[in-house]
Image: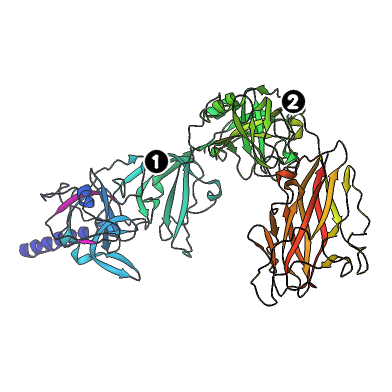
Amino acid sequence: MKTYYSFLRIILVRAAVLIISCNKTFDTPLVNMDPEVPVNMTIAALKERYQGYGIFQKIYDDITIAGVVTANDRSGNFYKQIVIQDATAAIPVLLDGNSVYTLYPVGRRVFVRLKGMMLGDYGGTIQLGLDSVRDGEYLNLGRIPVVQFDQFIVKGSFGNTVVPRLITPADLSTNIKDPLQSMLVQLEDFQFAVRDTSQTYADPGKEVSAVNFTLRDCGQQSLVLRNSSYASFAALKIPGGNGTITGIYSIFNKTQQLFIRDTGDVQFLQPRCGQGPAIPITIAALRQRYKEESIALDRYAVGGTVISDAGSGNIPFGWVVLQSGSSGLMINIGSAVTYHTGDSVVLNLSDADSLVNYGGVLQLKMNKNFEQPAPAATGRTIVPVVRTIQELNTALELPLGDARNPESTLITIFQATAEPGFFSGIHALQDASDVIRLYTQEAAVFASALLPPGPQSWTGFAGSNNGNTQFYLRNTDDVTGFVPAVPFTALFSFTGVSDKTGATDPTPLQEIPNLVIAPFKAVGVGDHATAGGRFSFSGWPTGAINGSDVLSGAVDDGRYYEVTIGPSPGAFLNLFQISFTLRRSGTGVRQVVVRSGRDRFKQNLPVAVDPGNKNVQVADENTFRVSDASTTDNTGCAVIMGTAFMELTEPVTVRFYGFNSESAGGTFSIDDVRIKGSIR
């Protein structure tokens, strides 16, 4: 009987041991200590041996590294791998098993025997595994089979702590040997975009394998967070606050990425950037916040008086300039500006708004959902500061955040002369001290008006554009000496011409105030028109052969069409362009040039043709060249008049010379001639 009970006791003890063994979660050593495994290389030294992207390297040396597990597959956000880290660096180890976290929990130290393993990379993140595996056009590392875990990995103590390294995105790089790659890192004052706070961490429906989010701090620094749709937290809602985030840093094809272990790594428990009561701030103080890098703002209230004129069009769409005291700021509202010059405006800012350098101009960029508040007052006046151009240029060289920089403030320059021409585009504006670029947008309502001649007073605001200082008028009231010119188009339709009319167009002339116009005349060619409704004559110089593009003729100075136009006494004439329709008969002229009396008809005037017209081309020396096959109307022919035809006080004659006709009986006709200009 005693023997029976002794035998029963042995069975019960063994059963208890077996039950305990079957229920344990982790394979932990009986004593929490590291085995005596010699370590002869750091992780950083190992990664330094890697030669570059896609250059996988078999390890033949007896090398052992050690590190503490910082990430595993427990949440499913890391797939069949662990990440280990020592004091120098970190590296993922690829394992072909499931629930490897039970063997290698976070905090366990492991020793990795590298002989027989392979060093490779995945999109630029260096990894450890076995032989390479071809996946289509890509080369990947193979994973260590379960049966070989203990061959390569020796388990050590557990409960070791790895303190995340506190970093900013500026500390990171896409260098394949960046020591921060695969390390446990932490970032402070980060948050998800507002639009993402209604999303889940990933796609629980698994229509996509992973989801990327952009994290930003209050300074608009950003980093990609990548979450697997197979992670246990994929269906959880993203937090809407601000705070710290911890994770494993990696790169994939130059994209910087962060992977969290679980949602405990996301501690966004603080108010978002810009939440809380609005803080009053001056434009000067706001500008001083800019430190040569774009910066997201806090919840500020900033006010000023509008000094720009959206209605004139000499400012980009959605932009407005505010000034308060001696400081100003360009605001990009992003939608049609409803403010007028002199409106007093207070803008409430948030972290979605930012200060940016836009081509050399400091700009307050409002968020896309910004709504323009009503003006707090209207009719306010900002008195411009008088500066010489030299003083202005020097001050504009100051940093954008310097309160002494006069950018976007109202300035008056006395006794400055602008380069002649239309307001549109860039013109030199010069006083006795220096030169600055005067810029007017093509869309400005006064773009086609002429700049006033001689020394004038100019009021506007200034800034830089890609290294060049520029001055901007708001409208023509900002410059003295400006007299508005009246645009006109003189049309010659030749409706009175028939095959019985003579060399002068009998069509009644259009009456335009302060403009004197003479009718078209044909000189040195046939004595009567060859067709009705257009100015068409024969008798042009020959030199072309039907069906050939060889042209041997030349202009005859005695054969041409001419028209004369001039200002009334005391008026000033500006000619911009002459457009017309060109036509030839089957044996008519193949080339046409246009000249003027401004240089005694010596040089051909610049010409252009509508790109849609395939029958007429602009040949060398500003010559219209007509296709041999063309015998119908060719529209879109134009003569560009240029600055020599500005501020004319005397009449000017323009001549059209046809030549290289295929026969003396061939014709050259013009029609629908439109002379565009302005008169003042």
Is residue 634 in view from this perspective? yes
Tell me the kind of residue under disc 1.
Ala
Q: Quadrant of residue 95?
A: bottom left
Nearer-the-camera pick, 621 or 29: 621
Compare residues 577 and 26 and report the one nearer the observer. 577
Decide whether residue 213 is among the magenta residues: no
The residue range painted magenta reads 51-74
Amino acid beneath label 2 = Arg
Q: Quadrant of residue 114?
A: bottom left
Q: Residues within 10 Å of mark 2 (few under 14, many from 20)?
A: some
- For disc 2, the marked residue is 380
Mark 1–mark 2 distance (CA, rounded to whole Å): 44 Å
Residue under label 1: 170
Image x and y of residue 19, in percent: 21, 60
The percent coordinates of residue 623 (x first, y second) are 68, 60
Tell us which disc is closer to us: 1 or 2: 2
Which residue, as the protein is rendered here, is positioned at the far left? 3
Q: Indicate left or right for 519 with 25 as reference.
A: right
Q: Does dot 1 land on a helix, a strand or a loop?
A: helix
